[in-house]
């Protein structure tokens, strides 16, 4: 028999029949989907009539209102009618599989392309390339140095705000201490002279990270000056630094357009905004569509994506107050101290079985996991790697806790899968740049929009339909503070405003941990009780509406210039960069709420002028003028107090006392931890005064530690029989205490007490890594007024303070903090205002570290009346 010849086919001429996405939906006749919801139809019509030709389009719809179907219908319209290659991006493989399954269910031609790109199934990849199917994949498939999927005509970004770190990571060299300690320490040592002694010592001590996170930035002039040595270190080691070698290849020729941020355990070198337009796989698309449950109001999506203008399809009329499901949002920190707030979480986990815990960073996630292992030792704990491909490992367990880091969107746990969600930690810093802007520069106006977006996204993880319901614990004093502020609350969706107000009002009425845990259990198990709560929240919802702040509108205006600036600097078009940064500062003019962000841009302007001086004709004092403007904006920011020594500034710029700035930061943190609202503050002050008024040594020493903390010191009570009874630390200033509150006031100070007090100075120097220049003092606290003559030789260089003086100081400090707190509550100010208020109040009330040292060192121990 002869061989059978291949039966070739004759390709048909491609004809294009224009059909809108709604018509495509009707053709599909999807089982179990009788028709489009009204909001879906409205969005699709608006897109087709007014947005289909625009390059960047954003779609906002609340969680559970059918975004996936909208995205897939638009994708099919672009593929079928425009003959375009279309990619649908998801944050994770698990979500990509979920969308792929939906595509199959809807009868749409889809290909699943996940995992290593050299392992994509050839038939699936070929179908995408030949425009036969829509490619469903993850963000990392596009945002890598050599993407195989580099030719899409249309890219659809699902859960667009989740793309933030996926996108920026392509241009961020990340050196982690835990993985590359030698490289990390070599870089920190290179900039030793440019980092404050306070932070350098903490970082290089090699101890576990302090409770207080470090966020810092190398001043740009010093960064540029030492760039050749930095390049040498990285070039010699980058191949051993994991994924950093890929991002290094993207930025190593544009390092002057980057900055170096660092913390205790990480270094990031990155541009201000990811220059996505330099990435062909992104920039080559004819249209990019960003879908999210909330888009924000201040241009944050543009900053995330590096796009100067994104056209937003408005929420359909009537849906501006709709949100899926019902949440009982409670704030344990409103009434309980931190350890009891955690007890609420653990009790709720026991009652609910399964729980989702969302954390902003690895540090908080590891802390929660350690608490879980301690309090619920046999409870299964899952993390992101366990559910990368499927949620089954979580769903199939009757009891389990899923702890995720920086995953506020992109996970769906509907119905009985999960009725308990814990937001553990304030989602203000998902990377070092954000952490620096929020914690060190107080540029909160721009980041507060991101925080609102992340909270909104987080609240939709366990309520995915109109009849869904879940308990939510907001477990962090900063979350309580943020949600309690009226100017923040009104920026949320009306439904969320009502739920937060209901939660705040009821949290403060709860009297015990058990009562809060039972409240949550009744909400999910008692139908009548649930109905009553639901009706109460629905009723008050009508009183709320979303009202973006006027200052946020300025951020929207400035964002196009910000993006233009980033690209001008990236291309070393310094004339244009200077022109753009000037426009940004004009856009941000006026209003104290913008001061922190404006100071940041004055600093960026100074950096640009500093770089320009060596490359183009420019006013030689321009950098000095811009840096000086940054430094004049506010007095209560500790980073600016250090910056002044590292950049050129005008002589008239006031010097900020770095110790007082740090003290201000610490007092602000205390007020934040104790809550601007709620009873925690008064309970803490009562406990402090009760403890400090006791002569019993352990109570007094605990009170001494609490007093140091509210005065803005890092206060501790070291364990051990020969250790100080208390240590107060402010940067590199140390005060060690020996307390003799139980001894008779009529007895003199003996030589043994002097030796103990003097030994604390030696103990502090041996136990800390600070330089020899560190100031270390030791103070004896007692009721006594005399000293034995034979103790005088041991008393030199030591100080004495009467117990009553410490108690007076405690009463004054608690009263001053109460006054500061009441002003903050009344004015509802941003963090920058809080710090300025604290800075000024400590000065006027004579509670600065200098005033405190005057009190503690006003009487030398050897000046006590001598006793034979």
Image: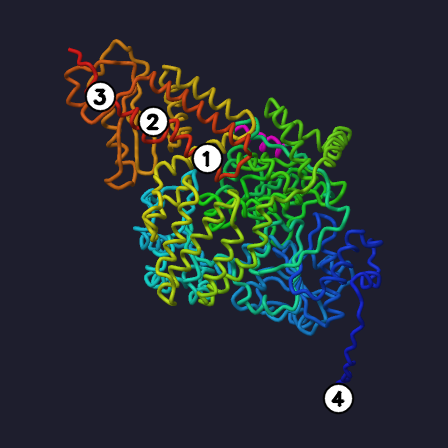
Residue ID at (66%, 56%):
158
Q: Is the magenta stretch mostly helix, strand or loop?
A: helix
Front disc: 4 or 2? 2
- Circles 2 and 1 in contact, beta carbons < 8 Å: no
Q: Name the residue under label 3.
A: 861
- Spatial distance from mark 4 to mark 2, Cα to Cα? 95 Å
Secondary structure, mark 2, is strand
Front disc: 2 or 1? 1
Q: Where is residue 39 in the image (x, y as percent from the top left)?
A: 77, 51
Q: Name the residue under label 2.
A: 726
- 714 shown above or below 627: above
- 358 shown above or below 843: below
Secondary structure, mark 4, is loop
Q: Mark 1 points at which residue?
A: 669
Q: Mark 4 points at which residue?
A: 3
- Spatial distance from mark 2 to mark 3, Cα to Cα? 18 Å
Secondary structure, mark 3, is helix
Front disc: 1 or 4? 1
Q: Of the residues under marks 2 and 1, which one precedes in the sequence?
A: 1
Q: Is residue 504 magenta?
A: no
Q: Give the range drawn in magenta.
A: 339-350
Quarter of the image with the C terminus is top left
Q: Where is residue 109 in the image (x, y as percent from the top left)?
A: 74, 66
Neighbourhood count class around disc 2 (C-alpha, 10 Å): few under 14, some 14–19, many 20 upward: many
């Amino acid at each position: 028999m002869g061989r059978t010849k291949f039966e070739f086919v004759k390709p048909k001429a491609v004809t294009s029949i224009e059909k809108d996405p709604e018509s495509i939906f009707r053709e599909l006749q999807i089982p179990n989907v009788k028709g489009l919801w009204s909001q879906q139809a409205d969005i699709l019509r608006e897109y087709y009539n007014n947005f289909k030709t625009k390059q960047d389009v954003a779609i906002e719809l609340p969680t559970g209102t059918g975004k996936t179907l909208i995205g897939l219908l638009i994708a099919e319209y672009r593929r079928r009618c425009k003959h375009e290659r279309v990619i649908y991006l998801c944050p994770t493989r698990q979500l990509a599989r979920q969308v792929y399954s939906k595509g199959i269910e809807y009868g749409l031609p889809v290909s699943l392309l996940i995992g290593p790109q050299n392992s994509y199934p050839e038939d699936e990849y070929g179908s995408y390339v030949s425009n036969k199917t829509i490619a469903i994949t993850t963000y990392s498939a596009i945002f890598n140095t050599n993407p195989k999927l580099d030719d899409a005509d249309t890219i659809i970004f699902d859960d667009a705000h989740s793309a933030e770190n996926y996108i920026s990571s392509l241009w961020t060299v990340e050196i982690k201490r835990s993985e590359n300690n030698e490289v990390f320490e070599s870089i920190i040592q290179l900039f030793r002279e440019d980092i404050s002694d306070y932070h350098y010592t903490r970082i290089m001590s090699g101890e576990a990270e302090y409770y207080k996170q470090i966020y810092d930035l190398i001043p740009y002039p010093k960064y540029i000056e030492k760039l050749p040595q930095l390049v040498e270190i990285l070039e010699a080691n980058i191949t051993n630094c994991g994924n950093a070698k890929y991002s290094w290849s993207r930025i190593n020729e544009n390092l002057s357009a980057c900055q170096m941020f660092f913390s205790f355990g990480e270094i990031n070198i990155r541009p201000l905004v990811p220059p996505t337009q330099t990435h062909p796989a992104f920039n080559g698309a004819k249209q990019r569509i960003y879908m999210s449950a909330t888009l924000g109001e201040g241009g944050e999506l543009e900053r995330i994506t590096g796009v100067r203008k994104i056209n937003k399809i408005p929420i359909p009329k009537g849906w501006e107050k709709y949100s899926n499901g019902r949440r009982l949002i409670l704030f344990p920190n409103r009434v309980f101290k931190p350890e009891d707030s955690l007890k609420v979480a653990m009790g709720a986990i026991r009652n609910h079985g399964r729980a989702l815990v969302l954390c902003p960073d690895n540090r908080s996630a590891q802390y929660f996991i350690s608490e879980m292992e301690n309090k619920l030792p046999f409870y299964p704990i899952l993390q992101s790697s366990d559910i990368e491909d499927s949620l089954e490992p979580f769903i199939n367990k009757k009891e389990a806790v899923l702890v995720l880091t920086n995953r506020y969107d992109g996970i769906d746990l509907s119905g009985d899968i999960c009725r308990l969600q814990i937001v553990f930690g304030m989602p203000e810093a998902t990377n070092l740049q954000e952490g620096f802007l929020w914690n060190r520069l107080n540029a909160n106006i721009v980041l507060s929009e991101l925080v609102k977006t992340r909270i909104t996204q987080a609240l939709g993880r366990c309520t995915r339909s109109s009849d869904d319901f879940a308990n939510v614990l907001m477990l962090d004093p900063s979350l309580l503070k943020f949600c309690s502020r009226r100017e923040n609350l009104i920026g949320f969706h009306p439904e969320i405003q009502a739920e937060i107000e209901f939660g705040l009002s009821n949290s403060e009425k709860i009297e015990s941990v058990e009562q809060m845990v039972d409240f949550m259990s009744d909400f999910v198990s008692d139908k009548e009780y649930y109905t009553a709560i639901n009706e109460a929240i629905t009723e008050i919802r009508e009183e709320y509406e979303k009202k973006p702040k006027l200052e946020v509108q300025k951020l929207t205006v400035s964002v196009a210039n910000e993006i233009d600036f980033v690209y001008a600097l990236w291309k070393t078009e310094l004339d244009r960069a200077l022109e753009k940064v000037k426009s940004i500062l004009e856009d941000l003019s006026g209003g104290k709420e913008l001061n922190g962000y404006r100071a940041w841009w004055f600093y960026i302007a100074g950096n640009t002028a500093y770089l320009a001086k060596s490359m183009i004709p420019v006013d030689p004092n321009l950098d000095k003028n811009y840096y000086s403007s940054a430094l004049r904006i506010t007095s209560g920011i500790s980073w600016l107090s250090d910056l002044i020594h590292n950049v050129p500034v005008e002589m008239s710029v006031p010097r900020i006392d770095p110790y007082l700035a740090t003290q201000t930061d610490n007092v602000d943190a205390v007020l934040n931890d104790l809550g601007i609202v709620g009873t925690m503050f008064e309970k803490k002050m009562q406990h402090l005064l009760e403890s400090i008024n006791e002569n019993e040594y352990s109570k007094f020493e605990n009170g001494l530690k609490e007093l140091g903390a509210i005065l803005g010191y890092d206060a501790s009570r070291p364990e051990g029989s020969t250790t100080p009874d208390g240590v107060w630390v402010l940067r590199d200033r140390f005060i060690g205490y020996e307390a003799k509150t139980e001894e008779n006031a009529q007895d003199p100070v003996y030589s043994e007490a002097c030796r103990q007090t003097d030994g604390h100075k030696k103990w502090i120097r041996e136990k800390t890594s600070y330089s020899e220049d560190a100031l270390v003092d030791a103070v004896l606290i007692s009721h006594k007024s005399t000293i034995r003559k034979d103790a005088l030789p041991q008393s030199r260089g030591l100080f004495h303070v009467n117990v009553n003086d410490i108690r007076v100081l405690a009463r004054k400090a608690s009263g001053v903090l109460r006054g500061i707190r009441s002003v903050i509550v009344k004015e509802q100010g941003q963090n920058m205002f809080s710090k300025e208020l604290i800075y000024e109040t400590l000065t006027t009330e004579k509670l600065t570290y200098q005033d405190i040292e005057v009190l503690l060192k006003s009487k030398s121990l050897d000046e006590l009346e001598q006793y034979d």
